[in-house]
Structures are given as structure tokens and as C-alpha cells.
């Protein structure tokens, strides 16, 4: 079946640094990719939806200048957490689909900001 | 807005025990309902879905019935195996017809099955 690869699986960084998370669709062209975040004991929350070649659509309350999303190709979307702070520590997961395909998820990235 | 509530875990069972993980939802309109499973180190995978009231989704021995009257979509399995140990997420799509573009998830329930 279709595979979505997400890297890194775990990252620890210092406060104030930026972290980039990659999400790749390995065997299909993902016209749409989604980024979710999950805090401990809370639901997976949709952060933004990105369509290839256009600006991402952010959910209410998500800072677009802090969470930069780039979907430059049909197989790659990146989420950059800029100037990360401890409150950004969370589990981030991407998903991807294309017309006629169901949704496929990456394995997630656990971000810890010290 | 739309939301999903599922029972907190972890749920610890012995092999061959009966499993129920409760899930209720609030939604306007007629959402589609899903159960996703995440095995250790892997991404979420669709386990089963139901797109309208009274539909029953089933896969790998798991079942869930879309109950509009109780706004529920409880996950059940008659006899769990150690290999079923995973995190289970209940979700709804605010689009009808099974479209999965925008999902609203519950918190996830960790299931641990002991031999």
C-alpha cells in the first residue's frame, strides 16, 4: 500500500532554534498534505492543510509565521518550527492523500524543546 | 464545533479477552466515522470506517457500528491478540460520503494485550 515517510522520528533541540520536519509520499503523488499536532492526553489537532504549489491553509489559533509549511513538490511537504520554545514540544504527524486515494499517515515526530 | 470523545487508556487485557473502546461524537450534519490504529513506530492506518447511520465497519476481527441515536461508534473485538497492542484513534470527517480530507480525532486509546 501507499507509504508516507516522516523524518525525523524524534528531535531534541534548544530553545530558540528552528526544526524542520519532512513528510514524503513514497509511491504516490500527494496533492494534499495535512499536519497534525498532539499534546499529551489530548486529541490529534489539525494544524494546517497544504496543497502542492500553493500556500498552506492554517487552522484557527495556529501561528503561520511560527509553523512554516512548504509543499513544493507532489511528494514532499516540510514543517519548520521556527524559534522553538518548550511549549512547542509535542508530537507532530503528517498525512497525505490524492484524489481517489484514502489518507495515509506518517509515523510522527516527537519534538522536545529544552 | 465537531468533536470526538473516546475512553482514556491504557486498556490492558489478556489474550482472547473481549475488547470495547468507547467513542462518541458531536457533529452537525452527517459525518463519516473512522477508527485508525497506530502500531509502535508506524504511522496511523485506517482500520475501518462507516459512512452513514447503522453502517457497520469491520476489518481484522474488529467491528464498529455507526449509531446516530447515541452518537457513538464503539470499537469491538471478540478475542484480542498480543499483536493488537497499539494506539486506537476514533475520528470523524466533516464531509459526508467517506471523504477523508479533514479529520477530527479523539485522544487515542492505548491497548496493551498480555499473553
Image (cartoon, coloured by chain):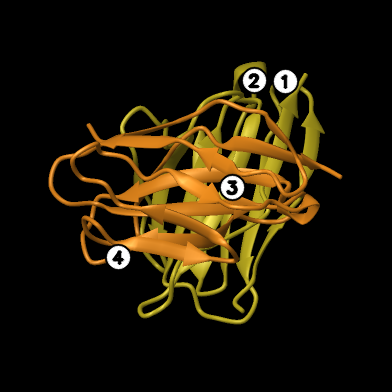
Chain colours: A yellow, B orange
Q: Residues within 10 Å of mark 1 (few under 14, many from 20)?
A: some
Q: Is residue A113 visible?
A: yes
Give the numbered dot on residue B98: 4
Q: Nearer the viewer, mark 1 or mark 3?
A: 3
Rendered-image quadrant of the N terminus of chain B: top left
Question: To which residue does mark 2 refer?
Answer: A85
Question: To which residue does mark 3 refer?
Answer: A93
Q: Are marks 4 and 1 on the same chain?
A: no
* Tag 4 near tag 1, CB within 8 Å: no
Residue drawn at x 25%, y 50% is B94
Q: Residues within 10 Å of mark 2 (few under 14, many from 20)?
A: some
Q: Nearer the viewer, residue B83 or B78?
A: B78
Relative to B8, residue B38 above or below: below
Residue A24's quadrant in the figure?
Answer: bottom right
Give the numbered dot on residue A15: 1
Relative to B27, residue A85 above or below: above
Instruction: Determine the chain carrying the residue at label 1.
Output: A
Q: CA separation, marks 2 and 4?
A: 38 Å
- Does dot 2 land on a helix, a strand or a loop? loop
Instruction: Determine the chain carrying the residue at label 2.
Output: A
- Does dot 1 land on a helix, a strand or a loop? loop
Relative to A94, residue A45 above or below: above
Q: Nearer the viewer, residue B60 or A101?
A: B60
Residue B17's quadrant in the figure?
Answer: top right
Q: Are marks 3 and 2 on the same chain?
A: yes
Q: Residues within 10 Å of mark 3 (few under 14, many from 20)?
A: many
Instruction: Determine the chain carrying the residue at label 3.
Output: A
* Tag 2 near tag 1, CB within 8 Å: yes
Amino acid at each position: 500500500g501507499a507509504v508516507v515517510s516522516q523524518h525525523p522520528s524524534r528531535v531534541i533541540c534548544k530553545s530558540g532554534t528552528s526544526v524542520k520536519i519532512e513528510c514524503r509520499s513514497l509511491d504516490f503523488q500527494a496533492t494534499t498534505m495535512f499536519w497534525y499536532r498532539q499534546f499529551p492526553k489530548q486529541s490529534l489537532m489539525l494544524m494546517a492543510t497544504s496543497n502542492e504549489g500553493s500556500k498552506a491553509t492554517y487552522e484557527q489559533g495556529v501561528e503561520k509565521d511560527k509553523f512554516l509549511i512548504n509543499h513544493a513538490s507532489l511528494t514532499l511537504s516540510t514543517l519548520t518550527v521556527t524559534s522553538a520554545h518548550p511549549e512547542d514540544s509535542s508530537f507532530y504527524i503528517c498525512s497525505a492523500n490524492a484524489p481517489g486515494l484514502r489518507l495515509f499517515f506518517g509515523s510522527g515526530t516527537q519534538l522536545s524543546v529544552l | 464545533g465537531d468533536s470526538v470523545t473516546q475512553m482514556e487508556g491504557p486498556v490492558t487485557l489478556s489474550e482472547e479477552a473481549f475488547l470495547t473502546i468507547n467513542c462518541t461524537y458531536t457533529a452537525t450534519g452527517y459525518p463519516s466515522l473512522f477508527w485508525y490504529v497506530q502500531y509502535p513506530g508506524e504511522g496511523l492506518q485506517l482500520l475501518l470506517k462507516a459512512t452513514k447511520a447503522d453502517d457497520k465497519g469491520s476489518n481484522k476481527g474488529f467491528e464498529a457500528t455507526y449509531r446516530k441515536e447515541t452518537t457513538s461508534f464503539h470499537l469491538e473485538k471478540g478475542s484480542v491478540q498480543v499483536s493488537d497492542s497499539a494506539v486506537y484513534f476514533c475520528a470523524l470527517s466533516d464531509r459526508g460520503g467517506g471523504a477523508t480530507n479533514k479529520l477530527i480525532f479523539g485522544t487515542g486509546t492505548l491497548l496493551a494485550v498480555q499473553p
